[in-house]
Image (cartoon, rainbow, N blue to C red):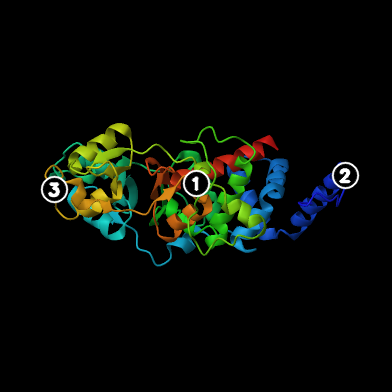
């Protein structure tokens, strides 16, 4: 023990036997609903019976926790009571932007009842604003993504997560068999639909458990001792959860931030993001410190919908000033909790010296988590 007294003897045979017994008990306790949810995900990947059974054993506990023993909710239940953001092909970009801004959703382009395209916030920023198109004179049909893939409203949240991951989609149109548009789900909708707080925490926590076996060399900076942590009522500081909560933000591998200056115009920032294929920029002040953040959604909501001229509007006028931030050494789970509970898609990251070194993107975090779970299944 910690005082140096001999208190026990490890026997590798007993350890192995105990481990197998625990796995068997966990499998016995996992609900049939959890098994069904995992098998649905396995079928999307083309997994055969044996593979599906193995995946069930691997993630059964996770799915049971995420959905409380119930089947994974369908997209129909997620979209119930939420009107679809629909425009017609001839709608001009200004009007489309106002519809998108009000609903905070991408626009579904529908012609005579049939889905013919989709037009998102990044499309508005990179295909219209950055290229200085006349918004009132440009039809959405000329810049939309035509003939997007869609899914049935009976698709489960698990299946939708898998489809979005495999195809690198951020949004997914939902249509009935006869083509009737039901609505649109985004990555954040699926995060909220993943069994509540316990669900999304289970997904990310399980992925980080897998990541613990590897190295952190892909992080922007090497993780240091956690000298400070995000203050949160969610942290218990007890038992195994304390170890998990101590895992730093660096484990989420924040992406390198795209930087704009506080005196830049909205037009120049959108052109920079379009050239670099980005969707958000951190804005620095005259002293080099972080002053704000601007995203593709902000451009539509605060510039297009407000009839502002991008070339004559400073980014400082429409950015989110003094955004919430986290440090590389803060708790990864608390950082994710901050994003989910506050509906933040992006979260700036500092190193321990106070320099801006990264940007967390909830969509990237979710994509990385699913990739790690898939790799673990492939290796099993």
* Cα gap from disc 1 to disc 3, whole angstroms: 47 Å
* Callout in the foreground (1, 3): 1
Q: In terms of image quadrants, where is residue 176?
A: bottom left
What is the distance, in whole Å, between disc 1 and disc 2 at their CAs? 36 Å
Q: Quadrant of residue 341?
A: bottom left
Q: Please, what secondary structure does the residue beneath circle 1 have?
A: loop
Quarter occupied by residue 257: top left
Report the front residue among 6 and 344: 6
Residue at 70% across, 38% down: 380
Q: Residue at x 48, y 63 (%)?
A: 77
Q: Which mark is residue 136?
A: 3
**Element carrying mark 3:** helix
The one of 164 and 115 positioned closer to us in this rendering: 164
In this figure, which residue is indicated by the disc labeled 1? 329
Local crowd at mark 3 within 10 Å, few (<14), some, or many (≥20)? Answer: few
Q: Residue at x 57, y 53 (%)?
A: 245
* Residue 174 screen position, x and y as percent: 42, 53
- Mark closest to the chain's N terminus, 1 or 2: 2
Vertical arrangement, residue 330 with respect to residue 256, above or below: below
Where is residue 73? Give x, y as percent.
54, 60
Which numbered disc flags the more N-terminal residue, 1 or 3? 3
Residue at coordinates 68% horizontally, 40% vertically from top-left?
48
Left or right side of 170 for 287: left
Q: Which residue is mark 2?
A: 11
Residue 37 appears in the picture as rendered: no
Q: Position of residue 293 (x, y in %)?
A: 30, 48
């Amino acid at each position: 023990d910690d005082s140096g007294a001999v208190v026990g003897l490890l026997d590798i045979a007993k350890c192995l036997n105990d481990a197998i017994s625990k796995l068997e008990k966990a499998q016995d306790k996992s609900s049939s609903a959890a098994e069904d949810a995992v098998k649905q995900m396995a079928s999307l990947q083309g997994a055969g019976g044996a593979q599906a059974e193995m995946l069930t054993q691997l993630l059964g506990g996770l799915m049971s926790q995420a959905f409380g023993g119930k089947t994974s909710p369908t997209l129909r239940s997620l979209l119930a009571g939420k009107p679809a953001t629909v425009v017609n092909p001839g709608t001009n970009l200004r009007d489309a932007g106002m519809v998108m801004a009000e609903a905070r959703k991408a626009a579904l382009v529908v012609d005579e009842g049939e889905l013919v395209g989709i037009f998102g916030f990044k499309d508005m920023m990179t295909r219209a604003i950055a290229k200085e198109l006349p918004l009132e004179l440009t039809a959405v049909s000329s810049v939309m993504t035509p003939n997007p893939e869609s899914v049935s409203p009976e698709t489960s949240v698990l299946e939708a997560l898998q489809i979005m991951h495999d195809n690198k989609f951020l949004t997914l149109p939902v249509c009935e068999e006869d083509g009737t548009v039901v609505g649109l789900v985004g990555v954040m909708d699926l995060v909220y639909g993943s069994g509540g707080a316990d669900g999304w925490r289970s997904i990310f926590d399980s992925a980080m458990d897998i990541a613990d076996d590897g190295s952190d060399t892909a992080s922007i900076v090497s993780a240091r001792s956690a000298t400070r942590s995000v203050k949160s009522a969610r942290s218990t500081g007890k038992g195994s959860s304390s170890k998990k909560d101590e895992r730093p933000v660096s484990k989420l591998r924040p992406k390198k931030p795209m930087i704009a200056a506080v005196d830049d115009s909205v037009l120049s920032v959108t052109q920079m993001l379009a050239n670099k294929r980005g969707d958000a920029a951190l804005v620095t002040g005259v002293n080099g410190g972080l002053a704000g953040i601007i995203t593709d959604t902000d451009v539509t909501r605060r510039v297009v919908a407000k009839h502002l001229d991008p070339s004559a509007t400073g980014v400082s006028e429409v950015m989110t000033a003094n955004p919430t931030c986290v440090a590389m050494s803060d708790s990864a789970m608390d950082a994710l909790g901050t994003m989910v509970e506050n509906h933040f898609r992006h979260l700036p990251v500092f190193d321990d010296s106070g320099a801006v070194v990264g940007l967390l993107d909830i969509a990237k975090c979710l994509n990385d988590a699913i990739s790690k779970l898939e790799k673990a299944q492939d290796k099993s």
